[in-house]
Image: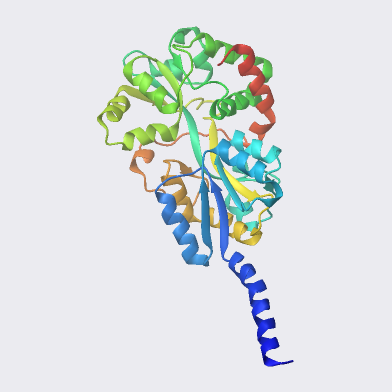
């Protein structure tokens, strides 16, 4: 072979191999998370593995729609979203591929992962009750069922019932009580509204703080976020409310997760699995949880968050969050029937 022909072949081979080598060093992440601590998390993963993290950040619904539209050509390797209901929606839509990983199976508790390895929880949050310390006695709001009791008429504030956080709670109530009793409970909650449902969890806490609401439901991290805030209005709201871990004498407090899994059409599958396994490491769990004032799901991981720690210990509901997906259709029927708008 003539020298110039050998050179031409070598260049052609290099051009073919280079993209493959480049792909070996990237993972494409679609994430609904957008916290400052995540920057260090991704940087540490790259430092440890040499794999660059390419990110697209958006809201959960926007990410799910984007992956659906991209179809088989989607560059997504990993999808990170919040709430078990949304994870179930993504799974049902075929957006995840199963992962067989001894690391993830060993480190992620069974109640916080899909039994078929379609998705994994990486941080957890509790659905707690906050109340107006001036008007409401803590013994009147010790359970989720108390929110439907006549003693709390005109006191209750929540998000709209169709929000995934609310649907997940209603799904848990269906699992514990059965659909009929869960509907009776939801009807009682609606009858006790202080105002039509609106806003997010922070709005519910502030509503209690200003006296507009007597009692409200919120994810725990929203309360801790206000506790850590330097704003006077946030501190005023925190000082005005008390908090209850619901159902400590029976089922325990409802838990939810943020998590993710391997995208169905992941072009960098092995890198994606390494990234998911990294998220289960003690190092990553601390970043993952502290960034949004949540708890790690890996029990050996340490958290340096005094405000979160100040909430104390509690009994969590041991219900597998994957079961919430099974009850989502029933939960949606319930909120529709009772007018939980």
Residue in the image at 70% along x and 87% along y: 5
Measured as percent of width and height from the top left, residue 11 is found at 64, 80
Measured as percent of width and height from the top left, residue 140 is found at 43, 15
Q: Tell me the quarter of the picture where residue 259 sits.
A: top right
- For the rendered model, the colour scheme is rainbow
Q: Nearer the viewer, residue 28 or 46?
A: 28
Residue in the image at 64% along x and 13% along y: 337
Measured as percent of width and height from the top left, residue 182 is found at 62, 18
20 w.r.t. 245: above or below: below
Q: Quadrant of the N terminus?
A: bottom right
Tell how many labels: 0
Q: Tell me the quarter of the picture where residue 187 sits.
A: top right
Instruction: Answer yes or no: is residue 57 visible.
Output: yes
Q: Nearer the viewer, residue 204 or 145?
A: 204
Residue in the image at 46% along x and 8% along y: 151
Q: Tell me the quarter of the picture where residue 174 sits.
A: top right
- The single residue placed furthest to the right in the displayed view is 1
Residue in the image at 54% along x and 17% along y: 145
Question: Viewed as shown, does residue 96 lie left or right of 145?
Answer: right
Instruction: Answer yes or no: is residue 182 visible.
Output: no
Q: Quadrant of the C terminus?
A: top right
- The single residue placed furthest to the left in the displayed view is 232
């Amino acid at each position: 072979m003539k020298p110039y022909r050998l050179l031409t072949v070598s260049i052609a081979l290099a051009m073919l191999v280079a993209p493959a080598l480049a792909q070996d060093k990237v993972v494409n992440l679609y994430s609904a998370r957008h916290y400052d601590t995540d920057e260090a998390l991704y940087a540490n993963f790259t430092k440890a593995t040499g794999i660059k993290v390419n990110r697209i950040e958006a809201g959960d619904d926007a990410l799910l729609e984007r992956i659906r539209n991209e179809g088989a050509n989607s560059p997504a390797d990993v999808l990170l979203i919040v709430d078990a209901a949304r994870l179930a929606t993504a799974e049902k839509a075929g957006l995840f591929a199963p992962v067989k990983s001894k690391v993830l199976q060993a480190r992620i508790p069974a109640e916080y992962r899909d039994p078929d390895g379609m998705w994994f929880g990486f941080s957890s949050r509790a659905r707690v009750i906050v109340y107006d310390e001036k008007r409401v006695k803590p013994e009147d709001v010790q359970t989720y069922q108390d929110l439907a009791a006549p003693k709390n008429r005109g006191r209750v504030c929540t998000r709209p019932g169709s929000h995934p956080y609310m649907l997940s709670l209603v799904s848990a109530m269906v699992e514990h009580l059965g659909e009929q009793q869960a509907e009776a409970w939801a009807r009682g909650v609606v009858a006790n509204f202080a105002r039509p449902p609106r806003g997010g969890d922070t709005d519910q806490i502030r509503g209690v703080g200003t006296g507009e609401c007597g009692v409200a439901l919120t994810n725990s991290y929203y309360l801790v976020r206000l506790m850590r805030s330097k704003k006077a209005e946030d501190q005023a709201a925190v000082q005005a409310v008390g908090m209850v871990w619901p159902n400590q004498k029976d089922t325990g407090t409802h838990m939810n997760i943020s998590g993710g899994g391997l995208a169905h059409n992941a072009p960098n599958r092995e890198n994606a699995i390494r990234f998911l396994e990294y998220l289960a490491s003690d190092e990553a769990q601390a970043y993952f949880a502290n960034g949004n004032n949540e708890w790690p799901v890996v029990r050996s991981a340490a958290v340096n968050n005094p405000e979160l720690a100040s909430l104390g210990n509690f009994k969590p509901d041991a219900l597998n969050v994957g079961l919430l997906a099974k009850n989502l259709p029933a939960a949606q029927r319930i909120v529709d029937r009772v007018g939980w708008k």
